Image (tube, rainbow, N blue to C red):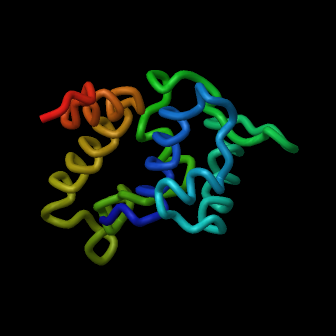
Amino acid sequence: MKLTSKGRYAVTAMLDIALNQAKGPITLAMISERQAISLSYLEQIFAKLKKSGLVLSARGPGGGYRLSRSAQDISVGDIIVAVNEDLEPRRCYGKANCQGGSQCLSHELWSDLSNMIQQFLVSVSLQQVIDQHHMQRPVTLGLAK
């Protein structure tokens, strides 16, 4: 079980849009520059995000991407699923045929872990991640030391 760069980059890119879309549509080039993610990789990721209905796009000058709904209404789990990230810890993928066609001794442990991961990712919204980030990095008021 491993969250790959695809999932991490998809979440990071969606956070970038959530933070910056008030200024207008966000281009992939903007995200690429701000987040140091390959533009071609972002194109692949955003094809999936758009297909899943998480982002809306506008073509042409002044075009780009924006969230399809509020950051509060998009979960990290939505994003991970959209980019086909596989976080399944069970070798049998829940089919209980892990050990020569029958259930292994630790099957229920990994099933519980799988459920906990899914519940956690679905319970965390983009807005919660943004809020947590701002709490850990307070905005300075530009006061001289």
| Relative to 131, 71 lies left or right | right
| Relative to 7, 119 lies left or right | left
| Number of callouts | 0
The C terminus appears in which quarter of the rendering? top left
Looking at the image, which residue sits at the far right?
Answer: 60
Residue in front for this viewpoint, 7 or 39: 39
From the viewer's perspective, is residue 33 above or below residue 26? below
From the viewer's perspective, is residue 2 above or below residue 142? below
| Relative to 144, 94 lies left or right | right
Rendered image quadrant of residue 53: top right
The N terminus appears in which quarter of the rendering? bottom left
From the viewer's perspective, is residue 12 above or below residue 143? below
Taking the spot 61% from the left edge, 57% from the top edge, the residue there is: 45
Taking the spot 65% from the left edge, 41% from the top edge, the residue there is: 26
Residue 122 location, x and y as percent?
A: 38, 34
Residue in front for this viewpoint, 141 or 100: 141
Taking the spot 75% from the left edge, 39% from the top edge, the residue there is: 57
Residue 71 location, x and y as percent?
A: 48, 26
Rendered image quadrant of residue 62: top right
From the viewer's perspective, is residue 114 above or below residue 57? below
| Relative to 65, 140 lies left or right | left
Residue in front for this viewpoint, 102 or 138: 138
Residue in front for this viewpoint, 69 or 143: 143
Residue 33 location, x and y as percent?
A: 55, 59
Looking at the image, which residue sits at the far bottom?
Answer: 100
Residue 6 location, x and y as percent?
A: 49, 62
Taking the spot 45% from the left edge, 47% from the top edge, the residue there is: 11
